[in-house]
Amino acid sequence: MKYQLTKPFLFLVGFILIVSLACGIGTPEEPAAPAPVEESAPAAPVEQPPTVPPAPTEPTAPTEPTAQQFYTETFGSDTSQWTYFLVNGTKSVPTFVEDDFGVIFVGADDERLKFTLESEGQWAYVTYDAYEYDNVRLDVVATNRGVNNNNVSLICRYTPDEGWYEFNIANSGLYNILHAIVRDDGVVVYTGIADGGSNKIKSGKETNEYSIICKDRTLTLYINGRETRVLEENNFVLRDGLIGVSVSSFGTLPVKVEVDSITISQP
């Protein structure tokens, strides 16, 4: 099951509005006595022109937000095309779960996509559901606000039947590229394609820019503008699917990552 991104302050705004209205309703004051009115001769009636009823108007249909195929998302307006799902990494094998577990927030706030993971083994995946892409470039600007033990991941060609390619970047300076798929029993099978390290990863509470290109059978990873890994993938050969971003928690908490922007473009 996939979930809509959370909007954290809608309830708070509604509550403040109700309180403000309540404060504006006070005890009615004693009405002042009406001033005396002098009697006068009745005025002659004035003839009124006939009233012409207004012509009926057609109701205006609400404007539907238009999804874009290639653009930069800053999460400041409509995010209905972005949803998330969750994998439980605390099991003996990672498992797709139907419901959130532990303390978690995944949603749009302050023009950012925010992940707050306060329980171990929460692997949250956010996907853009409006388009499926074959050849695509994805650029993600992410800022670490929590502990220095998490993964930020970029994914491409996600489909429920064939899985997805996943590029994991850890704050420790390591990365790997995987194929992942959810089996019928809910187990998520991750198969390694490549791994390595990069001194271009900014550790700690820093901002990093990660980019991937999925073009034909070539997978490319960039870290802060530096081409880090290029490979030909000939085992799974995924054709097309959704793009997305993921953040994972492990044994040190809380994990807090803010995604400032996601740019989807042609490679």
Image (cartoon, grey):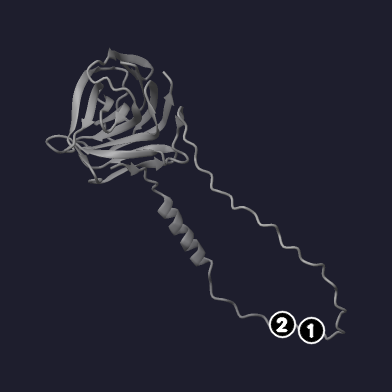
Q: Residue 35: where, in percent of width, then height?
A: 75, 82
- Distance from disc 2 to disc 1, alpha carbons, whole Å, reads 9 Å
- Disc 1 residue type (three-letter): Val
The residue beneath circle 2 is 34
Q: Quadrant of the N terminus?
A: top left
Determine whether 200 is above or below 82 in the image: above
Q: Hey, which quadrant is residue 136 in on the image?
A: top left
- Disc 2 residue type (three-letter): Pro
Q: Hey, which quadrant is residue 143 in on the image?
A: top left
Q: Residue 138: where, in percent of width, then height?
A: 38, 24
Name which residue lies at 71% across and 82% down. Answer: 34
* Secondary structure found at label 2: loop
Q: Residue 150: where, in percent of width, then height?
A: 25, 31
**Mark carried by residue 168:** none
Asked if residue 46 lies left or right of residue 3, the reply is right
**Mark carried by residue 37:** 1
